[in-house]
Image: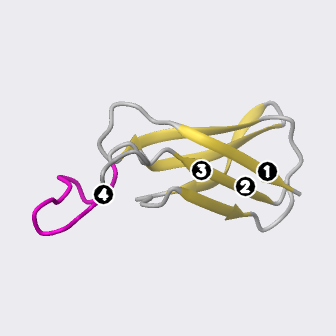
Amino acid sequence: MRQIHVTFNDDVNEDLINLHHHITPFEVMPTLVKDYRIEVYANGGWKTIAEGRDNRKRKRVHTLDAAVVTDRLRIVVESTNGSDYAEIIEVRVYA
């Protein structure tokens, strides 16, 4: 794999009409994953190959410097922007 696309839940049902009479109480969607790392299983252990810090976007694309061969990938969520839970909508891996 050479590229990893991750789509996080940013609560697309939230009313985001930020007019003068209605402003959301948060700057970033609380359900959005803030800090995370992407790991692959290699040589009997997990190795971090990419990470995101202070994320504010629904979709993140990680392009690796070199291709990685593995049969296992995991995303470890370290924190959200305020929610008690985290949701990943989609993960796509490209060669």
Q: What residue is shown with label 4?
A: 16
The image quadrant where one finds the N terminus is bottom right
Q: CA distance from mark 2 to mark 3?
A: 10 Å
- The answer to whether mark 1 and mark 2 are in CB contact below 8 A is yes
Q: Earlier in the sequence, mark 2 or mark 4?
A: 2
Q: Earlier in the sequence, mark 1 or mark 2?
A: 2
Q: What residue is shown with label 2?
A: 4
**Rendered position, 69 above or below 60:** above
Q: Please state if 88 lies on the left or on the right of 12 as rendered.
A: right
Instruction: Return the x and y of residue 85 as percentages of the image width and height.
Output: 40, 31
Depth check, front residue: 87 or 44: 87
In the image, which disc is placed on residue 93? 1
Q: Identify residue type, mark 2.
A: Ile
Q: Earlier in the sequence, mark 4 or mark 1?
A: 4
- Residue, x 45% and y 50% (percent of image)? 35
Instruction: Return the x and y of residue 74 as percentages of the image width and height.
Output: 67, 37
**Rendered position, 38 above or below 66:** above
- Packing grade of label 3 (10 A; few <14, some 14-19, many >=20) is some
Q: CA distance from mark 1 to mark 2?
A: 5 Å
Q: Identify residue type, mark 4.
A: Leu
Q: Identify residue type, mark 1.
A: Val
Q: Earlier in the sequence, mark 3 or mark 4?
A: 3
Exactly how many numbered labels are in the figure? 4
The label nearer to you, 2 versus 4, is 4
Quarter of the figure with residue 41:
top right
* Magenta: main secondary structure: loop
- Packing grade of label 2 (10 A; few <14, some 14-19, many >=20) is some
In the image, which disc is placed on residue 7? 3
For the record, the magenta segment spans 17-29
Quarter of the figure with residue 3:
bottom right
- The answer to whether mark 3 and mark 4 are in CB contact below 8 A is no
